Amino acid sequence: MTGPVTAAIADFTIAANFDDISMSVVDRAKIHILDTLGVALAGSVSDTARIARAHISDYGGEGGCTVIGAGRRAPARFAAFANAAAAHADNFDDTTPQIRPDRTGGIHASAAVLPVALALAEQSGASGRDLIAAYLVGVDVASRLNHAIDARHYADGFHTTGTLNVFGAACAAASLLGLDRERSIAAIGIAASRASGVRRNFGSMAEILHSAHAAENGLAAADLASRGLSSAEDALDGPTGYFSAAAGAFHEREIVGRLGNPWVFDHPGVWIKPHPNGALTHPGAGCLLTLLQENNVAPDDIDRIEVRTNERVWKTLQHHAPDSGMQAKFSMEFTLAVIALQRRAGLADFTTDALLRPEIQEMMRRISYTPYETAGDGFTNVTTLIDLHLTGGGHVSGRSDHARGSTEDPMDFEEVADKFRQCAAFGGLDENRARKIVRLVSDFETLDDTRPLTAVLS
């Protein structure tokens, strides 16, 4: 018997139609598509992306789909793998947050879902409308699954960007492959045996590949289903299924009846990152920057910085004394030290060389990061408190419940286009092609064929 969550996901996937999607959601989707393409271009020059490309090359990965930022092509599953690795390489990709304030652990859905949709659309010559619809389906499925799975899943160490994105990627692929209900259910069941990723790998190359594995495994699950491979109809939500094995429980009401109702781009929204590191540091970074600017505080004026979040965030940002640039991306102490010294934190700042700078190390020693015991009135699951103590004896305090780029403080298309151009330049793309990509994404729903876009991404 088909499980209720599996049935809801399959029915949603096959029913999704561009004409039924509001233009406000389409416009937000285009903003996030542009953002994801930008971070993939920036990430394409990373060591992890280079390793991913070498990996697929050794498998004889030659074919018809664009590998972003590289002068080569590969079969769809390998292109999706390489492009998802690039999109998540700098931890600069977007995040769908949790809804409930007592839960932590957003999901980076776009970096896994868009590479699948892009590869299959390029392979078939699908329209921009078809790609947008498939992308929205995949992001919604992955995000709502993250709301529905029991909190134990993330708390015990699973990383939803790896584990749950495989289902979103499978559904995006099922949409573009035109799978019927039976084969969409099979794709979900196959994906349940391919879902993986643990948070212990935060701050390592292996964590970057969580998005890549989710993209490849989701696409492969849909492809296998399209060829007739079967699965249990409740491998996701039945006894001894994925929910049971990896979380012990799930909350059906958080997904059944809620897929596309509303779309997650409407509620709770999907956050775009202003800094290339763990999103949980961003409320603190924004809060500190505001305190520095409003009070005209120079680095030498800072005696110490005390920062507090809830314990779940504190445990997630586990690298309190990072020893590499990758670990620094999951360090509140490093992020605030960079902001304190530079009043910005960009792609060039999250490197091992930057971490080892004496002034960074000295500023980090002035930062104390601890969890608070009790959430106050109006606290969100990312509320961050900062006390900035000055060398003259005074201090100023601030609180941030959200980050720049979040639903409460969103970035519009032009702001994301500016971020895109910076990322594209970092990845070596010339200005003319960058401008063309911005223009194509702006008019994406009018494209009869997505291949003019992928042609300028290589």
Image (tube, rainbow, N blue to C red):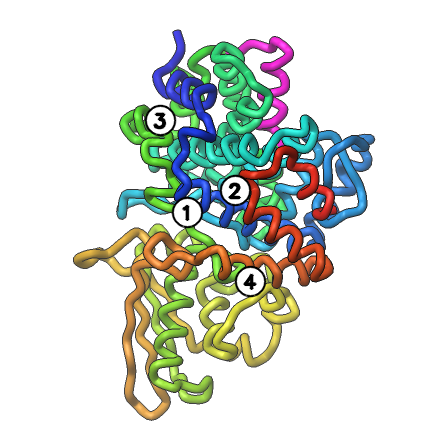
Q: Which residue is mark 1?
A: 270
Label 1 and label 4: CA atoms lie apart by 18 Å
Q: Residues under labels 2 and 3: Cα distance? A: 27 Å
Q: Quadrant of residue 390?
A: bottom left
Amino acid type indicated by mark 4 = Asp
2 or 4: mark nearer the eye? 4
Q: Which residue extends farthest left?
A: 377
Nearer the camera: disc 1 or disc 4 = 4
Q: Nearer the viewer, residue 314 or 254?
A: 254
Quarter of the image where one finds residue 417: bottom right
Q: CA distance from mark 2 to mark 4?
A: 19 Å
> On residue 110, which mark appears?
2
Residue topped by disc 4: 418
Dot 2: what SS?
helix
Label 1 or label 4, whichever comes before in sequence order: 1
Q: Earlier in the sequence, mark 2 or mark 4?
A: 2
What's the magenta region? 216-231
Residue at the spot 50% in from the left edge and 72% down from the top edge: 344
Q: Assess whether mark 1 and mark 2 are in contact (beta carbons under 8 angstroms).
A: yes
In the visual, does 416 lie left or right of 423? Answer: left
Disc 1 marks a residue whose amino acid type is Val
Residue type at numbered disc 3: Gly
User: Which kind of residue does numbered mark 2 sit on?
Assistant: Ser
For the residues carrying marks 1 and 3, which lies nearer the camera in this image? Answer: 1
State the CA–CA distance, disc 2 to disc 1: 10 Å
Q: For mark 1, give the secondary structure.
A: loop
Q: Residues within 10 Å of mark 2 (few under 14, many from 20)?
A: many
